[in-house]
Image (cartoon, rainbow, N blue to C red):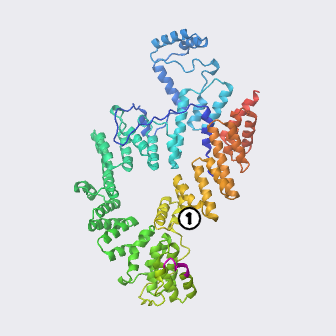
């Protein structure tokens, strides 16, 4: 079950106490380079934010404030006494006159926010709140606010504290979500940030990463523009601009980043600081060219010169040049660069590049030797390795095949479920009179995807093994589908029995590659494998369910639902698993009613049904609390508690729901019960608030 962190409860409970953050006003922009007009001013806090400094502690902050007020000539209590007296007497004219007098004497004077509050609600020391603020103890802050309101109903935290608390909560939520790579929560928490004026740049960088990972191009461009295109003396420090441009290389075409760099590089210092960015941009330019099929005009030699003449060449740069020359159809040159890269860094990517460069020159034997030498490196991409090795099996007269190659080839076939290559290996075994292995591989090929040549090969193998009953059953099954293949099968001449490596039968212990990637949580690779199966017409409902879990792991909810839907029309366990996956996908999207409909339509079994219902009630309780529908919160929590035990964090939510409904007795009982067996600051403060109310009855 999806569990809720404790601090979320604290944030929800505070929703009725504090002012919301300012809404985010979206700016429209099509590209990173589009920026018209001026941006709002940026204060000096930018320098502190870049240096990673935090806000001063509560005592230090108040001392600074007091010193600033004295230096600015603010009125003292004696000067303010008359203003407060007239306000208490509701003599508005006298209030206005006194305020005018104070402004003449103290030019920086502003009307106090607590002027019209009752005297009992004025001037309450917020030291305790600031101490809790410095600890990011949001539960403690909420409890302290509730306690003070219960003592003085007209009291409210100062605007300064309220604004800073909302900001601190925002920072904590964004930082924790970014650390967990929960990009949706980062975006939600950062919704009130204005990219054009924000001074804490690390928060903007978190938003950049979140928008980049979720593919939200328009808001991504807005954040970049807000950082990079501030003008005049409001321009951000060079270190911030350089770091932001390095991120932009990942997210935008090289031409757009270059345009921004030309606009920014107006000082010699920044020009020097941008040199590493310029080199990264060259890499990006070459990589974009390599990846874009529409780009066909080769880059100039001057553009490539820095990459070729690097003082400390890197393997990845050599590989980049290798792919570049392979694309512009100079495979001999690309083979040289890949050869250098492979010497420095023997890995799958460089081995693939060298293989393709040699194959493009029709150097089949040399290309095959690259694949044979790097079997281990290439084993992570069974599809590529299988294709690289297949030529030798299709042309066995070229040379004797090593047993290691046969083992690797057969393993990759089983990992990829590739019927075509299973057929190639089957004919290789058949032509070398390894009939048992041939029949086993032909059977695999037919099981994965039937075709005339595969059925014919299986039939021939049965005849060579004198398995007449199996032959008859096969003919009966496929005679109507493939009538032309049976003529002359019984009179066909046996193979010559060419010398060949030993072929073993398919091993059941080898898992399909998509399933291995799923188990290792390589969800994108799993989906690629399944797409290959679907393209070959071999995607089974069982495999489609694995695709649903992979899409769910990537939070691609609509695709997950589509994959699970393929199994809803199946039978048995596949249908049950598909319904379970569909329900979880709906709950991930907070669609509790739709998830409940799945439970009504498809029996999941007692354990899974209880799990899904518990999550439904949990989400309804949370949503109701957010909307201040506290009775609905209790109803959902009660329904959930009838199914599974209630954890402490939800019990706290229950206590606060009782509190907001005015049922302080029940609230106290909840917090007392929690406090008896749990040491938690939030529980203690809840108990304190409800106990203080109880003593005043």
Specify whether 401 is left or right of 665.
left
Give percent across and percent down for residue 635: 71, 42
Q: Quadrant of the C terminus?
A: top right
Please give the residue where the numbered disc 1 appears in the rendered image.
Answer: 541
Q: Is residue 357 above or below residue 156?
A: below
Query: Which of the pair 89/46 is nearer the observer?
Result: 89
Give percent across and percent down for residue 368: 36, 75
Q: Residue at x 72, y 39 (%)?
A: 671
Specify whether 69 is left or right of 619.
left
Give percent across and percent down for residue 542: 57, 65
Q: How many marks?
A: 1
Residue 461 lies within the magenta run: no
Q: Quadrant of residue 51?
A: top left
**Which contiguous range is marked in magenta?**
476-482
Dot 1 falls on a residue whose secondary structure is: helix
Q: Is residue 540 above or below residue 98?
A: below
Residue 478 lies within the magenta run: yes
Give percent across and percent down for residue 320: 33, 60
Mark 1 nearby-residue class (10 Å; few <14, some 14–19, many ≥20): many
Q: Residue at x 51, y 72 (%)?
A: 448
Q: Is residue 338 above or below residue 305?
A: below
Query: Which of the pair 496/83 is nearer the observer?
Result: 496
Q: Is residue 406 above or below residue 355?
A: below
Q: Residue at x 60, y 19 (%)?
A: 117
Query: Which of the pair 487/618 is nearer the observer?
Result: 487
Taking the image as drawn, is residue 374 in sight?
no
Taking the image as drawn, is residue 29 in sight?
yes
Q: Residue at x 33, y 41 (%)?
A: 33
């Amino acid at each position: 079950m999806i569990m809720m962190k404790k601090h979320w409860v604290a944030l929800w409970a505070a929703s009725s106490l504090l002012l919301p953050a300012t809404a985010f006003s979206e700016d429209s922009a099509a590209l990173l380079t589009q920026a018209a007009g001026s941006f709002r001013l940026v204060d000096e806090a930018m320098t502190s934010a870049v240096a990673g400094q935090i806000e001063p502690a509560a005592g230090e902050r108040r001392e600074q404030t007091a010193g600033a007020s004295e230096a600015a000539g603010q009125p003292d209590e004696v000067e303010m006494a008359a203003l407060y007296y007239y306000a208490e007497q509701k003599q508005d004219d006298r209030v206005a006159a006194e305020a005018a007098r104070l402004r003449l004497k103290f030019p920086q004077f502003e009307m106090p926010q607590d002027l019209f509050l009752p005297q009992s609600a004025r001037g309450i020391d917020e030291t305790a709140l600031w101490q809790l603020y410095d600890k990011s103890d949001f539960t403690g802050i909420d409890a302290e606010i509730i306690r003070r309101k219960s003592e003085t109903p007209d009291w409210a935290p100062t605007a300064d504290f309220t604004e800073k608390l909302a900001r601190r909560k925002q920072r904590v939520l964004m930082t924790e979500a970014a650390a967990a790579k929960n990009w949706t929560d980062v975006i939600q928490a950062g919704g009130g940030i204005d990219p054009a004026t924000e001074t804490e740049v690390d928060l903007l960088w978190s938003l950049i990463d979140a928008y980049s990972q979720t593919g939200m191009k328009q808001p991504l461009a807005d954040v970049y523009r807000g950082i990079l295109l501030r003008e005049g003396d409001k321009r951000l420090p060079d270190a911030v601009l350089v770091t932001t441009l390095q991120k932009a290389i990942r997210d935008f075409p090289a031409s757009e980043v270059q345009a921004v760099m030309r606009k920014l590089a107006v000082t010699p210092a920044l020009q020097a600081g941008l040199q590493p960015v310029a080199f990264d941009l060259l890499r990006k330019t070459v990589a974009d060219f390599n990846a874009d099929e529409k780009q066909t005009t080769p880059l100039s030699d001057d553009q490539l010169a820095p990459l070729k003449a690097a003082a400390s060449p890197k393997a990845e740069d050599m590989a980049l040049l290798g792919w570049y020359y392979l694309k512009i159809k100079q495979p001999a040159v690309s083979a040289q660069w890949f050869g250098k890269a492979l010497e420095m860094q023997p890995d799958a990517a460089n081995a693939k590049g060298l293989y393709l460069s040699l194959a493009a020159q029709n150097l089949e034997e040399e290309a095959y030797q690259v694949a044979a030498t790097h079997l281990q490196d290439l084993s992570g991409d069974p599809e590529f390795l299988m294709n690289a090795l297949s030529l030798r099996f299709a042309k066995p007269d070229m040379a004797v095949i090593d047993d290691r190659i046969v083992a690797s080839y057969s393993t990759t076939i089983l990992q990829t479920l590739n019927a075509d290559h299973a057929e190639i290996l089957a004919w290789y075994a058949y032509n070398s009179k390894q009939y048992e292995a041939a029949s086993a591989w032909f059977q695999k090929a037919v099981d994965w995807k039937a075709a005339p040549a595969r059925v014919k090969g299986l039939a021939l193998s049965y005849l060579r093994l004198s398995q007449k009953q199996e032959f008859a059953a096969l003919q009966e099954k496929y005679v109507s589908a493939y009538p032309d293949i049976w003529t002359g099968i019984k009179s066909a001449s046996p193979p010559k029995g060419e010398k060949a490596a030993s072929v073993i039968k398919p091993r059941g212990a080898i898992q399909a590659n998509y399933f291995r990637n799923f188990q290792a949580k390589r969800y994108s690779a799993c989906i690629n494998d399944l797409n290959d199966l679907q393209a070959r017409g071999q995607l089974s409902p069982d495999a489609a369910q694995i695709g649903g879990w992979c899409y769910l792991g990537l939070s691609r909810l609509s695709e997950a639902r589509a994959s699970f839907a393929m199994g809803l029309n199946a039978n048995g366990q596949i249908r049950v698993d598909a319904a379970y996956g569909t329900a979880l996908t709906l709950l991930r999207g907070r669609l509790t009613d739709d998830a409940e409909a799945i439970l009504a339509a498809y029996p999941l079994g007692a354990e899974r049904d209880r799990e899904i219902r518990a999550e439904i009630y949990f989400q309804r309780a949370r949503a109701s609390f957010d909307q201040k529908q506290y009775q609905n919160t209790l109803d959902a929590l009660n329904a959930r508690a009838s199914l599974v035990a209630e954890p402490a964090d939800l019990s706290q939510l229950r206590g606060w729901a009782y509190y907001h409904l005015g049922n302080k007795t029940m609230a106290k009982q909840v917090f007392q019960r929690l406090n008896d067996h749990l040491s938690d600051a939030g529980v203690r403060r809840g108990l304190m608030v409800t106990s203080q109310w109880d003593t005043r009855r």
